[in-house]
């Protein structure tokens, strides 16, 4: 049975959709690893540096609270993200299937940039707290 050009084009769109969602899923898993492993170590460092007495910036407290939540309830993360990945795949597939391939790639990049921006924001909040703690200890 010979594949028509339409079937080949559809198979190409399906492969690119799978790659899109897989990339976004890898970034999401890395974010979960950061929240479960890296952030608790930062929390320990912050507690040790400030003897638990210094008030933390709001962003740092939000990051620490999210980390505690995901460490205790890690199983919620895949449940929350499953519909997001289905929506991501649907939007990308529908855009790539038609003549909107540039929009599909733009969608992919926007989601990826949003994930990276959130990660940088969270890690930046932690690093800022460590910086503030070290400057207050030095001063």
Image (cartoon, rainbow, N blue to C red):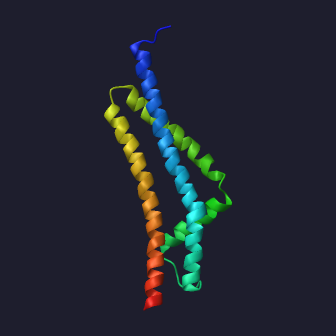
Rendered location of residue 81, percent (x, y): 56, 46
Q: Residue at x 48, y 82 (%)?
A: 133
Total number of numbered discs in the rendering:
0
- Residue 18 in view: yes
10 shown above or below 90: above
Rendered location of residue 80, percent (x, y): 59, 48
Rendered location of residue 91, percent (x, y): 44, 35
**In the rendered image, which quarter is residue 48 located in?**
bottom right
136 shown above or below 64: below
Q: Residue at x 38, y 41 (%)?
A: 107
- Residue 66 in view: no
Of 56 and 126, nearer the camera is 126
Q: Residue at x 45, y 87 (%)?
A: 136
Of 61 and 30, nearer the camera is 30
Residue 40 in the figure: left or right of residue 138: right
The quadrant of the picture occupied by the C terminus is: bottom left
Q: Residue furthest bottom?
A: 139
Q: Residue furthest top?
A: 1
């Amino acid at each position: 049975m010979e594949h028509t050009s339409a079937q080949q084009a559809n198979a190409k769109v399906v492969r690119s959709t799978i790659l899109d969602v897989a990339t976004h899923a890898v970034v999401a898993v890395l974010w979960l690893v950061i929240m479960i492993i890296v952030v608790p170590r930062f929390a320990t460092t912050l507690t040790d540096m400030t003897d638990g007495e210094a008030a933390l910036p709001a962003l740092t407290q939000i990051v620490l609270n999210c980390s505690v939540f995901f460490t205790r309830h890690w199983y919620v993360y895949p449940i929350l993200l499953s519909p997001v990945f289905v929506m991501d795949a649907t939007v990308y597939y529908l855009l790539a299937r038609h003549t909107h391939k540039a929009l599909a790639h733009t969608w992919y990049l926007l989601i990826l940039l949003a994930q990276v921006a959130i990660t940088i924001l969270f890690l930046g909040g932690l690093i800022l707290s460590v910086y503030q703690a070290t400057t207050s200890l030095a001063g």
